[in-house]
Image (cartoon, coloured by chain):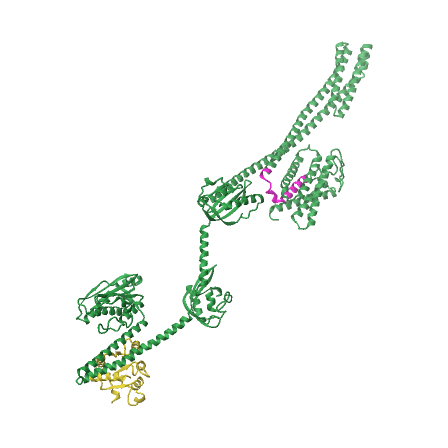
Chain colours: A yellow, B green
Amino acid sequence: MNHNSVEILLVEDNANDAELAIRELKKHNMANNLVHVKDGEEALEFIFATGKYAGIRDIGFPPKVVLLDIQMPKVNGIEVLQKIKSDDRTRSTPVVMLTSSKEDPDVKKCYELGANSYIVKPVNFEGFAEAIKNLGFYWLLLNQPPT
Amino acid sequence: MKNKLPIVSFVAALVTMGIGIFVMIGWFIHNDFMRMLVPGQVKMKFNVASGFVLSSIVLLLYHFREKNKIWSYVSILLSVIVSLIGLLTLAEYIFGINIGIDEFFVKDELRTTAIYYAGRMSPLSAINLLLIGIGLLLLNKEKAAAFQFFYLFGIAFVSLLMLISFNFIADIPTYIGLAIHVAIGFITLSIAIWFAQPELQAKISFERKLFTGFIAIIILIVLLSVFSSYYSDKRISTSRLVEHTNNILSEAGQTLSLTKDIESGGRGYIITGDSDYLEYFTIAKNNIFSHVKKLKELTADNPAQQVRIDSLSALITKRIDFSLQCIQLTNDKGFEAARALMDTRMGKFYTDKIRKVTSAIQQEENDLLIQRQKENNKSIVSFNRAFFIFLGCVFILLVIILFSIRNNFAFRRKAEKQIKESEEQIQTIFRAAPDAVVVIDSEGKITKWNSMSETLFGWSADEVLGKPLSETIIPHRYREAHKKGMKHFLKTGEGPVLGKAIEIQALNKNNIEFDVALSISPTIVNEKHVFIGFIRDITERKKAEEKLKESEEKFQKTFQASAAGISITRLSNATYLDVNDAFVKMTGYAKEELIGHTSVEQGMIINFERREKILQQIREHGSVKNFEITVRNKSGKMLEVLTSVETILLNGEKYAINIIYDITERKKAERELEAVNEELEAFTYSVSHDLRAPLRGIIGFIAMLEEDYSSKLDDEAKRITSVIKDNTLRMGLLIDDLLAFSRMGKQEILKTRIDTQIMVKEMIDGLVQQNKELVISWDIRPLPPVNADINTIRQVWINLISNAIKYSGNKENQRIEIGAFNQEGQTAFFIKDNGVGFDEQYKSKLFKVFQRLHSTEEFEGTGVGLALVEKIVSKHGGKVWAEGEVNKGAIFYFSLPAEDIEQKQKSLYHES
């Protein structure tokens, strides 16, 4: 897999949620260039081409969108978001936050830090699927990233 | 010397002394000018001069009064000497003796005669010196004021009279006369003594001065009369003198003519022998001596004339004898013999001599007449002058008296007017006084009763005037004491209640006692004691005092009994003025350790910044409300206290009343609660996140199962997966509601104006849109706007309306009513449905979380909706309640505080 042509970076520690998300994106042919990392630390290594991604990735080729779970062990989503948005090289990368509840106080914080959107991971699977589908379309097909 | 008068006295005394010394020197050097001043006048005697000098010394000593006793003894001694000089000289005059004081110091060149006493002063001077000596002993004695005035005035007046008289009236006996400088000296001495005692002038009443003036005038007039009568006698005696002289002249003339008759009668008879001639001769001879005799009588006072008349008489006798000889010769020897005798010319010789003597007598008389006329005229002329001067004096005195009477009258009129005005003023004060003013006489009877008294006691002046005070306004129990007190005062002049304000009770006309402040001033009017009482109603003041006392007591009790620690501190230096028991208990310091000390001194303050903040707030706002601060108590324990401070003014000084609550325990509990809350928060968070994740997994994978393996699942398997899915979804809902409910506790309320009407309308429209199959008849009444948090209140409406729809869903003609009304100042809303309702006995469970009155099979729900409603409304300060009946429907109410006025105005402004 060419790590420089990744379209979606999914950062999700919950394997079930990740599987469901990937399955849904696949359904709509959007998971072709998808990388799934399981924690914030790896996400940062991927984005900033460090650690195990050092040398195999170029920071100049960011993913088209990052789906970022908030609740994660080690480095949580908010910290990842903060790092992305505070670095000039990565700031323009769209980040969509994944949250368990829309009443989560972290949602507000995410917007303040520059998150581009958020998705509530509903218990209802149909709703979740719909959200992922819409999101994928929007960010991959409609939204033009800044050049 | 405080003013001019003593200076006048001082100068006059010096002048007097100068005169005295001048004359004394005159005596020592025998200079008559110095002793007399005017030649021919009387001399000023040495004793008078020494009297002048001694008196002047006494006066000068008096002016330079030393607090030295010796000088006062010297003054007394000198004064006694002066009066002794006068007294002894007088004694000499009265008893006609000479005790040798007149020439004690110097000898007089003139010797004592019938009308002159060598060296002895005039009796007038003696009297003057006696009086002056006594006057000097009594200098400035108040009781001697009249004496001083009279004798000094008398001396000055008499001396002045003498001064005038001696220059004009020659007929005053020399020995009572005064030399010019004696008169002047007495005048200056009188002035010196009088002006040395300016205090006495005020003591001499106007009447006395007037009286003195009149006496002076009377004396002047008496003197004038005496002199007038004396000089009119003198005029009469002048005309008598002329007559007397004329008599003498005529007698002399007749004597001469009879002498001629004798001569010619004798000659005729001798020549003619005619006896007729003889007859002439004989008549003349017989008459002539009676004339001579008369002449002698008339000139009895003039020895020279007597001698002349005696020689005249002898000559006449000789002439008669000669004629008789001739007649005898004629008769005896005939004419020729007689002729021979006649030829001797003896007859002519005698006649010529007689003629000469007669003319000498006549001449003498004429001369005398002229001389006496001259003398009389001279004294009459000088008297006339004195007369006019005296008259002038009388006139001047009269003018002075007239003017002073006029001035005095004007002064009196002015004084009377002033008295009248001041009387009117007193009357006005009396009438208008804000206090009751009551005057009683020495018998205790009311003599004055002002209008305030009428108001205060209810008695009119007519009713009480003349009545004893003790029968009107004095309460019965004080009446005896009042009478005794008055008697005691009249006897001794003492009264314990007089002259100061006392508080006592008085009685009004209706026999009701009330508190008054009374002050009594005794005074004397028309030589009788009266008592003026000022009385003020102090009922109100007493009440106010009582109230104040009560309020103070209240404060004291509150202060002491308060569970809160209270301290009063002086703001200027932060020292404690007082602390209550709770404060002592809280801080652990004894009262004595705090009062007069500061909290800083005792080491109670550990956070000075915070203390400074409190002080600053006190300075800026005068008070502090519920400020938290940590202090250290005596045992070193940290106390968290809630302090509120108010400042008050006590006697012009600012004090702070500090009320503290020990909130150490509460703070601890709060902190614990906070920790618990945080834990709960974390728990809720994990519930929302971590519980949902497996749910999502369950549902997601069941969905995958259904999608990917539906062909392989039989109907029962599909039912089972469906049940799993439903339950999982329900659990998701439960978690969401629970989360929302717990969040609500933390949510902040942000009040804005909500147009309830519009909000509810939009909400229902939305609901109807979503569920097109709903057939509900809505009855929405006017709904007033409220001031509330729009997000949460929207939740309330959604929950309640949803409930109404849900629980009436099984009814045909479903009906929901929404309205509002006012309740206890709050806006109450209600949502009424005609659904299943509820059993009133479970009402208490309605708003409790997870409490449901229906099963999930009957109605969907988690049991959180109404609990959330209750929480939101109560957070707004409102109330929720419900009424219902099974199968008849339910009414849910909630109330919110009515939109306040300020908010209303704001909203009106926005709307316009």
Camera-side residue: B85 or B438?
A: B438
How far across and how far down the image is residue A1, in percent? 24, 89
Spot occupied by residue B175 in the image (x, y as percentages of width and height): 71, 35
- Residue B804 quadrant: bottom left
Residue B743 pos. (x, y %) = 30, 73
Q: Residue at x 59, y 40 (%)?
A: B205
Residue pictured at 73% horizontal, 33% vertical: B115
Q: Which residue lies furthest to the top in this view?
A: B274
Q: Does the magenta stretch include residue B490?
A: no
Residue A94 shows in this picture: no
Residue B294 location in percent, x, y? 74, 20
State the image quarter where residue B369 is shown: top right
Residue range in magenta is B180-208
Q: Main secondary structure of the magenta part?
A: helix
- Whether B200 is among the magenta residues is yes
| Screen quadrant of the C terminus of chain B | bottom left
Task: Indicate whether B338 appears above or below B552.
Answer: above
* Residue B68 seen in the current view: yes
Hey, which quadrant is residue B27 in on the image? Answer: top right
Q: In this view, does B394 lie to the left or right of B752?
A: right
